[in-house]
Image: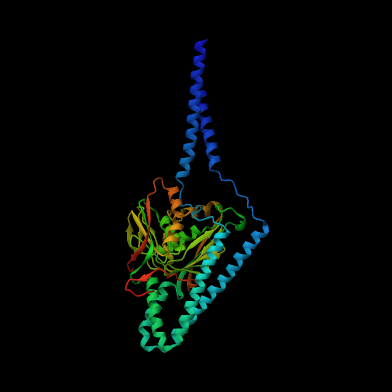
Amino acid sequence: MELFHRKKEIYSSQLAILLITGIVLGFLVINQAKHFTNYVESIGRDNTENVFRRIQILKTSNDELKEEITTLEKQLEELTNQAQSFVTIDNEIKKNEIIAGDTDVWGPGIELVIENNLNAVWFTDLANELAASGAEAISVNSIRLTDSTIGFDSLPNGQIMINGVILQAPYTLQAIGDKDALDQILTGPLGILEKMGATFQDFKYTLSKKDRIDMKQV
Amino acid sequence: MSTSIKIMSIFTGIFVGLLVMAQIKTSVPVVSSYPLDQLEAQEELVKSYVDDETQLKSRIVSLREEINKTLDDNNLISQTTNLEKLNALKKEIGLSEIKGEGFYIELDDSQFIDRASLKSDEPGIIYAADIRDIVNLLRANNVDGIAINDQRIISTSSITSVGNSVLVNNSNLAPPFTISAVGDYESFLIRLSDPGVLTDLQKRVNENGIKFSIKKSLYIILPIYNGQFRLKFIQRNDGTVS
């Protein structure tokens, strides 16, 4: 009888161990499935923010558009004055050279260094996030992104090329702009760094705010 | 203990684990607590901002056109070299139209889909990410210029979304999305034929009814960029202020 009870105890403990092992395996399977989310899928790459964010974007954008109108009206007025028009054209050239990347520039901003290998989709989304966050100039591994250089090309061996240069990790992305705003948006909830952290098993990056970032002309 | 019982126990455990984990991962849909009139007020506010934005951008375009005309009309013989330089820069940064041979890419949601009523993970709609990927492919193909519907794309253009709304240069665009490009059609077709590009979009075209077409055109006009340039923090390195 005692032998029978002992056998029953052993049997129950074996069953409990097997059940617990099964439950743990179940946890691991689901967790692993989530970890290797394919970031190439478009669903999940965009934010699902709400109407408040939309209103905030519109308000900021409209304020900036009004400032642009003021600048253009002043420029038009100066151009009608022949003497002033020479100065106006020179100033416009200097301003457009900054935008086009035809001159060395500097300003406060952020520097983001990423150790992991990235595909073209990540670079596209990173550059877009920085632009949407108010970056006035962006560079990747010291290559300024302008209308003539931007375009991340995927090579057959998986490498990424931009402006004829193959990008190697670690990747250094720099952006000139409001460093606090840029930092906040990159690291904020549902931001791209959070998404990258969820996608890569061992995501390594450093993000620093800088008082001075230099970018060479293209 | 019999082998069958052991196997059954393991599978039962795995199943229970999967159920528990799936329950933890599932997010409960949040039912809005806002009364209907507050939601309507928010939508009215968005609409009024959007109307303002349209008017402001239209004003910007007309001012830029007027400035270009004034520069052309002015008798600035001694400034000819500088004018040429200015015009070249304007072309580079999207402040003048680009005209030439090119192609259109049309993207549209799956038929019978009502975008406004959908969750944001519906595979049958076009996402901002899809448009970004196509724009990147066009840039990698060295096209001369790109526009999406009436929005000219420049290096600092953003293509984002809020919920299911697609924003280009902060302007709300509705499908169908027409991406116009001035550039080499044949070389872009070769790129598109690579099975490794736009894999997710291709899959959703085949499986979820997303509409995608590309058409060559002998003459395309890309509009002037109608947004603002942000130059509050950036400066030239030669000591002059922007």
Pick whichever, A89 or B196, lies toward us: A89
The answer to whether residue B150 shows anywhere in this view is no
- Locate residue A13 relative to residue A201 in the image: left or right: right
Whole-percent x, y for residue B108 in the image: 55, 60
The C terminus of chain A lies in quadrant: bottom left
Q: Is the residue B48 above or below the residue B86 in the image?
A: above
Nearest to the observer: residue B237 or residue B173: B237
Residue A172 in percent (x, y) is at 35, 57
Outermost residue, top side: A1
Q: In this view, does B112 lie to the left or right of A8?
A: right
Q: In this view, does A24 lie to the left or right of A52?
A: left
Q: Residue B13, how many percent across, how many down?
A: 52, 31
The figure's colour scheme reads rainbow
**Circle count:** 0
Q: Position of residue A74 (x, y in %)?
A: 47, 81
**Can residue A199 be seen by looking at this rendering?**
yes
Instruction: Kindly identify the residue that appears in the image at 52 percent across and 57 percent down.
Output: B127
Q: Nearer the viewer, residue B139 or B194?
A: B139
B57 and A152: which is toward the camera: B57
Picture layout, residue A10 above or below residue A99: above
At 51% across and 72% down in the image, what residue appears? Answer: A65
